[in-house]
Structures are given as C-alpha cells and as structure tokens.
Image (tube, rainbow, N blue to C red):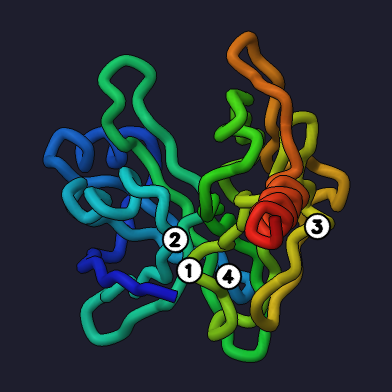
Amino acid sequence: MKSIEISAKLRTDLGTKYATRLRREGQVPCVIYGNGQSTHFSTDASSFRVLAYTPEAYIVKVNLGDHSIDCVMQDIQFHPVTDDIIHVDFRELVDGKATQMDIPLRLMGNARGVRNGGKLKQNLRKLVVKAMPADLPDSIDVDITNLRIGQSIKVEDVKPAGNFEFINSPGAVIVSIKTSRKAVADVDEDKEDAEGAAEEATAAEA
C-alpha cells in the first residue's frame, strides 16, 4: 500500500479553547488511538491535501520529532459551513496485529449491460478490509465486463486477491445494471458469433 508522511507536533494543552487556537493558526488537531493510549498532535492543514481529497487509501507515517508512528486515518471531521478540516482521528498500526481499513473499489471493464443501454448503479465505493498492515491492498478491482442488465455483483462474488478478508456483509450489492428506456435486447454475443461463423461456412461450401 502507498504511504505518506506528515510532520506533526505533540499537543500537551488539550481542550476546546486550545483546539480553536490551533485552527486559527492553520493547524488541525489530531489524535492517534492505539496500544491502550492516545497520542494528541497537530499538523498543518495542508498535510491533508492528499489524504482527505482522494479516493485512494494510504498508510500515514506521522513524524513527531525524534520518533514516528505508522497509522491509518479512521475519521475526519469537516466544518459544516466552511468545509475546513477541524479534527482527524488515526488508528495506530502494530506489527503482527491485524487492522481494518476502508479500501477503494475500482470497476474494471465496460459492462455488457451498459453497452446494451442499461444504467450502471454503484452502491459501494469502498470495502472494509481486515489484514496485517503489510497485506493491506491499494484497491479492490472488480471486473464488470460480463455484467448484464438485471444482474449485480455482491461482496461474496469478489475473491480477495491477497492475504486479507472483507468485513462487509457478503450479500451487500457492490454494483448492478438497471434497465432503462434505451435498453435493447441482450443478444448472447458468443452464440451470435458462433451462428455467424456457421452461416459463413455454409455460404462458402455453397
């Protein structure tokens, strides 16, 4: 999995008053949960330019002076009016201990049902993955090439391509193809190709 580093300063003064002061200075109050303790720190708001505004997942190395902590972003809070980031929670990664993380889904291919006029509906854009830190994937690829109108792909239909497991409900629908006014009859392309080849062969013999 990709990783990103951010520079941070430990916070010793906690509370709303101090958090508000940090935000005025362009800093974001943060906390790392792990190993039975919490590490409070602040970092420049620009540190989240990649983390907060991309669908990709990252392991975050938080550099705190003479030591660093590997973690993953667990929750991010935005101001309801300005959309500024006001607080971020992280979860520490521990070697030898499995962790859970939201991993983005990537739909691969041009769905057959869409080619026939159907409408693609994606219900899930991320899956919750449980794995050792070293086994966390960058993304989950789902091939939708053969998906027809009226069909769907559920979590249970996706086989993990690595040493990890999905925590989502097996029956949860990831993507489906709905019919539409533009939909046309879904002709079996393989059968059509075979029939066309047979007709050509017959014509050649004649």
Q: Which residue is mark 4?
A: 34
Compare residues 114 and 62 and report the one nearer the observer.
Answer: 114
| C-alpha span from label 4 to label 3 | 33 Å
Q: How far across and how far down the image is residue 28, in percent?
A: 27, 46
Per the image, label 2 sits on a secondary structure element best described as loop
First in residue order: circle 2 vs circle 1: 2
Compare residues 123 and 152 and report the one nearer the observer.
Answer: 152
First in residue order: circle 2 vs circle 4: 4
In the picture, the disc for residue 120 is none
Q: Nearer the viewer, mark 2 or mark 4?
A: 2
Q: Which residue is mark 2?
A: 57
Q: Which residue is mark 3?
A: 157
Task: Give left or right: position of 206 versus 18.
Answer: right
In the picture, the disc for residue 138 is 1
Three-letter code for the amino acid on which mark 3 is drawn: Asp
| C-alpha span from label 2 to label 1 | 6 Å
Q: Residues within 10 Å of mark 4 (few under 14, many from 20)?
A: some
Q: Residue at x 58, y 89 (%)?
A: 95
Per the image, label 3 sits on a secondary structure element best described as helix
| C-alpha span from label 2 to label 4 | 19 Å
Three-letter code for the amino acid on which mark 2 is drawn: Ala
| C-alpha span from label 2 to label 3 | 22 Å
Pointers 2 and 1 in contact (C-beta within 8 Å): yes
Q: How far across and how far down the image is residue 113, in percent?
A: 65, 35
